[in-house]
Image (spheres, rainbow, N blue to C red):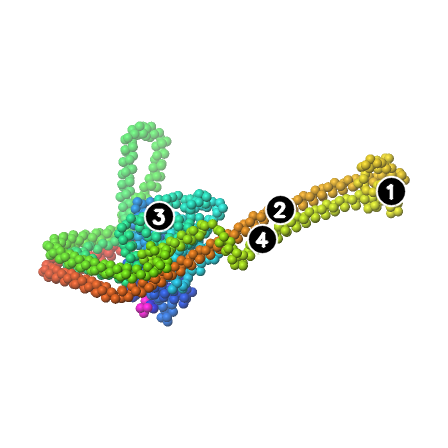
Amino acid sequence: MSLICYAKRTKDKVQLQEKPFASGGEGSLHRIKSPSHWRGLVAKIYHRPKRTKEREEKINLLIKHPPEELRAGQWPTFVWPRDILLTQDGRFLGFVMPFVQGKKLELLCLPKLPKKLNPSWQRLALDQKNSRELRLRIAFNLSLAIYRLHQTDRYVLVDLKPENVVLQSNGQLALVDMDSIQIKENGELKFMAPVATPEYSAPEYYKQDKPKSFAPSWDNFALAVILYKLLLGIHPYAASAASPNEQLVSLHQKIEAGLFVHHSEAQRLFKIIPPPHQGFLQFSDALQSLFIRSFVDGHNLPELRPLAEEWCWALLEELKDPELKQRFQQMLLQQGLQFKRLRRPSDILPPLEKEEKKWSDYLPRDYQLALAWKMPQLSYPKSAQQINLEINMDSWGNFILSLIATLATAVALLSSFPAIYDWMSKDLLQYPYWQIMLIIQGFFAFPILIFPVIIRGIHQLVHPKRFKWKKLKNNAQKLQNELDQWDSKLEKSKSKLVEFLKTELPPFQALERESKAIKLSYQEGLQRLDLAFEELLAQEQEHKAVIIAPILAQLQTELPELSSAHDFKSALEILRKAEQNELLAAQKEELGQEFHQFKAMAQAEKRLAFERLAAEEKRFFSYIEEQRELLQDRQKQDIQAQHNSLSRFKNLKAGYKQHLHLSARDGFSLILKLNEAGFHSMGQLDDINIPKAQFIFRDGRVLNLSDFSQNDVNLAHRFMHWLQACQKTERLTELELKRIDKFYAKEREELEAKARLAVPKFAKRKADLQQQAQDAFLAKKAQNIRQQYQEKRQQVRQAQQRFSQEMQLVLEERSPLYQALEEEAKQLQKKHKEQLNNLAHLHQHNLHQKLQEERHRLRDWQAENMAQIEITLQKKAGIEQQLSAYQP
């Protein structure tokens, strides 16, 4: 079954394999069956919920503006959409793109490579001798790809990670998942990137105000992470953090906190740093500086992260490859001159011959077949039954050999140890008991051990299938002998034929000499055209210098800091470095009067935040003070209540009814008399003498109860009980007072604890507000710096646009020169190719005429002989199939 769809641009009918060979969260990948010229492509069909109009527009925009490859027909650096696929009724299905094979770059980001990989990959292992240079080349290729993509000023990958990079063992790589990138058009965000991977996401992703769109600096961070992992096999943030960051375990948390392993304060920030990070110290100072700028300086200021071009230059210095460096410089030169549409003749013309022809390529077809002929080999795996049968056929022989080996071993042992033989023959066998036991054991052991083997051997010898199998085997051997005879005969004939054909080598060698002369002439002509092309480029350089000089002079007048710029690229680079320096200086300078002015001019919400916090702090500590006073008042009230309760309990007037058990008249009369005598409360008493019915006061006075009542002794007992109750109540009151003191002490302690805890909290909130104000101030200052340099860059771009317009006019005027040069190169190629073809055809014609007369040398390869060999092979194949299908 096939899936039928239609290409939107080419209108081709596309037939896909219905079963996908890979699938993911967005869609599935299908191989293309037709048309034939699309065989090198693959189709991505989106799942139904993903087939939106917005996605179709995004794919259409990607197709409209592809990044230019360095050379046509090369390994694709970007797996870019080529065409949109539609259903028959015009509904969006997906797109087609190049099909690339290889390993994910993540494989090289591991400390060790899997052992199952073949040697071409194992040479990239970190412990191999030349792996560092190979990995540096891969790093350069990746940096170059990112540089070329960013040069379009349209695209940001956003989800740049090793899983989205397909790598071949020779270092070539391709970026996949291109339909998920961010797209800008005319500086405005057109399509957002849907996903980002936390391990490769820049720190600004974790801020409260997440970016609405991503700048190229986002990719620059991910690129630095990938390069670090590629060169060292470990993530740059993979280490155990020390206090107070020990709770940060995941990599994205450490990225957010800026915990780069080689931070200047690494000893304070980390407890354990894995050993693979030590390889960082072997990098050159330039590479180390780029990594530090990526992860330390660029943590808060993304503009400080190195560009992909800077990585390219640093990696080239590490590689020390002058040829690669020269090619990179030429690419930059062509981009600067806008010569992407112009290529050297040697780059656009295919070679005269795809591959060098051997002398055998000129032979007639039947001669080539004769020289290439080999006896076909039939290989049928033996079935388990056939293997068992062969084993069974040899079982009787194996038994006899085993028996002989056992007897020989026994004889050798007895002859080697004569003492054992003497003991067995003279002592052991002399006893009748042992003789009888040996006879009995032998009688039972012989049939048990020997008879099954003998019977099985006899059964196999007379088994009818043995004879059938043996007959088939003999027939197969006869057919094989016949094939061997044919093979020997044809090999001898082939040797004679080769000896004869060697006599035709001189004409072929003459042909080679003439072909080399034609090719040399072609190369000389091509070099001449390349030199002419270089002269045209040099003239373009002169035109460029004439056009750019006044424009650059005017720009330098408007922007004096560009006085050292020699072109627009260097001008932009100067502005970028100046912007970085100002941002760094703004971050490091101390806050002065300008900051206080900023605070005074800040937004009302920001300005009132300090006032609200101060009011909240004042209210809180006022509340604490009120609570202190309230606790003190409550404590006094509780103590007073206890004292009042005790006083009422001791008061004679209040308690006589409860404790003296007198009538109201008698009791009241008695209390009045005692009050007149100065006795008002039981607290005045020290003791009571019951026999004498006397009150002993604390001040030493003594009062006789008989003076006030006739029932003095009985009344004394009642007063004694009252006094004892008062003493007990006093003790309980003392305990209650202690409890009250303890309770209010605890309340005061909790209140003071709240006050103590509130002090650092308010201090921290003040510091946070202060830091927020500082961050807002620095952000505002950085924004002003960025805005300032954005305006300057805009001036440079406007000047560059004026230059491009004037240069374009020159290019249009000189375009016929390049066209004429290209046409001359095509004619040169056509002329020399015709000469080569004519020469080859003449040699082939003469050779075929001569060999036509010698066709008797091919008689052994006649059709009837080949048919006879084919019949023999088929017979042997049939017998082999019967043997393989044998079932005993």
In the rendered structure, which segment of residues is drawn in magenta? 9-14
Neighbours of disc 1 within 10 Å: few (<14), some (14-19), many (20+): few
What is the CA distance from the residue labelled 3 to the residue labelled 4?
Answer: 50 Å
Which badge, 1 or 3, comes first in the chain's sequence?
A: 3
Number of other residues with Cα within 10 Å of mark 2, as a class: few under 14, some 14 to 19, many 20 or more: some
Q: Amino acid at mark 2?
A: Glu
Q: Is 601 located above or below residue 717 in the figure?
A: below
Label disc, if present, on residue 676 of the rendered structure:
1
| Front residue (pair 385, 457) | 385
Q: Is residue 683 magenta?
A: no
According to the image, label 3 marks what residue?
286
How far apart marks 2 and 3 lie (CA) works out to: 57 Å
On screen, residue 375 versus residue 93, left or right, reads: left
Task: In the rendered view, tell whether residue 789 sits above or below residue 739.
Answer: below
- Residue 10 among magenta residues: yes
The residue singled out by tag 4 in the image is 614
Q: Amino acid at mark 3?
A: Ala
Q: Quadrant of residue 542?
A: bottom left
How far across and down, in percent of the image, does residue 273 sit? 42, 44
What residue lies at 27% left-to-right and 50% top-to-bottom?
322
User: Which type of secondary structure does the marked residue at label 4 adopt?
Assistant: helix
Position in image of residue 635 (x %, y %): 70, 46
